Image (tube, helix red, strand yellow):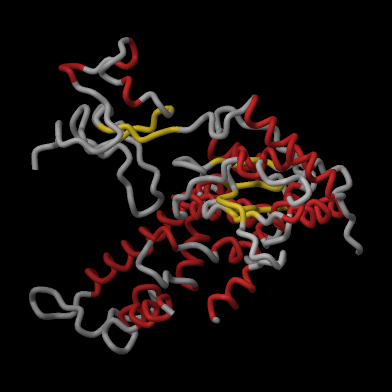
Amino acid sequence: MKNKAMSAALVAGAVATAVAGLSVTTPAHAQAKEKCYGISLKGKNDCKAGPGTTCAGSSTVDYQGNAWTLVPKGDCVKFGTAGGDFALPDGRQGSLTELDRDLPQA
Amino acid sequence: MQADRISRERKAPDGNGDFGQALLDASLPSPDGVIGPDGKPAPKRFNVYRNNVIVSLIEALGDTFVAVRRLLGDGYFGALAREYIVHHPPTSPVLIWYGKSFPNFMAGFPPLQAYPYIADVGRLEWAWLQSYHAADAEPLDPAVLGDVAPDAVGQVRIERHPAARLISSPWPIYSLIQANRFAPDDPPAVDMQEGQDVLVARPEIEVDLLCLPPGGAAFLEALFDGAALEDAAGRALTAAPEFQLPVCLQTALSAGVFSALVPDNGQGHLSAKDDATRGAL
């Protein structure tokens, strides 16, 4: 079967349409998430690494510093600084990197 | 090469392969040298170990093929997995790499002939796991493509993002995996007459599944194979006359399935093969 062809001008127009549509209406990865450390209640941390690596729900103290939960991008820094759902007790804050506070007793 | 080495080690930890074979075949006696504290052979202890090995592998397959297990039921899945494990034991100690041939095994398993869609659901679940564990990479910024001169953009080649996968099926595998794994509480309607082409992407942390419109699979397959944009669009039109280039390109760009434009080497025919040749020179 012979391939149908699409003209260069049509392709260029389609690229322009696709790229313009993206920059105006839907920024790429609008639903992006980030790992946020130190905000999970015990047993509620995320981890989806597949078989053989069960770490989801393995944190043993509240707000464990080396356990993370996925949150919408940009929300992590709000934990502990903004009120409402973002409130954390005793001056704790969420962090994009691992923390050494609230670690379980070895 | 690496897999070969590991495979040999697995078959012959004691130098003659008895141990590994006896683990998977309950009709074989417990291997020589397996003894209890009293110095006597300990077949019961070996059976406990044998059982743990098989059960943990069944569980690993069940964690990877969640929708398949749900579709078949725990009992059937366990028996099927046991059959697979005995014939296809792991060749790597890494469990996330175990089960690649499981979909093909299901496709060739006579009792499952009446359920031909099961193997394709398995292929999609395998693609999901591989996408999850693929290398991280920054997705292509759509503006980079937008900046290419209009008279050159048709000849542009685009690199596949390391986590991007494409699974095409004559069965509604997207609806089936949603209903049986990702959205069991809000399942989509499943029309068994409908084929679905599913794009698997992981631009950041979470794996996304997208159902492609007509021609989308042919278009992306061509691009992932190294075809230029204009050529890929032509192939998609051939596969599906209703193919819409702007829609499919926008879907792919926003899903993050590209990582970069392939640099033009001046000949306009850069492909993986040319790349390898250049590397050799």
Give the x, y percent position of residue B241: 89, 47
Residue in front for this viewpoint, A66 or B80? A66
- Quadrant including the N terminus of chain B: bottom left
Residue A86: % across, % down: 32, 17
- Whether residue B178 can be seen here: yes
Q: At 61% across and 58% down in the image, what residue appears?
A: B262
Residue B116 lies left or right of residue A83; in this view the side is right
Residue B116's place in the image compared with B139, above or below, is below
Residue at 69% across, 38% down? B250
Residue B158 appears left or right of A32: right
**Viewer-proximal residue among B218 and B50:** B218
Tell me if residue B242 comes above or below residue A82 in the rendering.
Answer: below
Tell me residue B193's x, y (percent).
79, 44
Q: Looking at this view, name the residue that lies furthest to the top.
A: A84
Of residue B110 and residue B102, the one placed in the foreground of this image is B102
- On the picture, is A11 further left or further right than B115? right
Q: Quadrant of the C terminus of chain B?
A: bottom right
